[in-house]
Amino acid sequence: MTENRISDIATSAAALYDGGWRADDRDRLITEYDLTVEDADAICEALHDIEEDNDSSEDEDLLGVQHDRVERATEIAAAIRSMDTWDHDLCTELCELAGLEDEWEAADGDTFESILYKAADVFGVELI
């Protein structure tokens, strides 16, 4: 392959990926764009590479977000442990981080602590 053709394949694959095409769409690409088998295979290989790169980037982003949530939950738990009473704002934030906002909003004086402990369990933190 010439350098220009490789560049064209990579550019085409990037544009196709942005348009929702994936490596598994080989036969549809051939039909839709009247591609040769050779060009379709080259584009699909490039699409596959893009998919792998994006999957690992998304995983890294997700891990970063999860790490940030755990770190914040740890900070909140430490702050709650240092207080003599429950801080409503901190408790609300912890429950939101744990995805328990509906349960927290529905909690009353008899049930709020069980929801807080459930939120703490999500992150493996201690509240008392």
Image: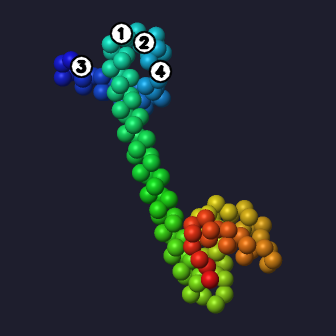
Q: Residue furthest left?
A: 2
> Helix or strand or loop: what does disc 1 sit on?
loop
Quadrant including the C terminus: bottom right
Q: Amino acid at mark 1?
A: Thr
Disc on the earlier residue, 4 or 3: 3
The disc at residue 25 is 4
Does 46 appear above or below 37? below
Residue occupied by mark 3? 5
- Residue 29 vs 62, above or below: the answer is above
* Badge 1 or badge 3: first in the primary sequence: 3
The N terminus sits in image quarter = top left
In whole angstroms, how far apart are the C-alphas of marks 1 and 3?
A: 14 Å
Cβ atoms at labels 2 and 4 below 8 Å apart: no
- Three-letter amino acid code at disc 4? Asp
CB-based contact (under 8 Å), mark 1 and mark 2: yes
- Could you tell me how far apart the alpha carbons at marks 2 and 4 are, in whole angstroms? 9 Å
Amino acid carrying label 2: it is Ile
The residue tagged 2 is 30
The residue where tag 1 is placed is: 36
Q: Quadrant of residue 120?
A: bottom right
Can you see residue 26? Answer: yes
- Distance (Cα) linking label 3 and label 2: 17 Å
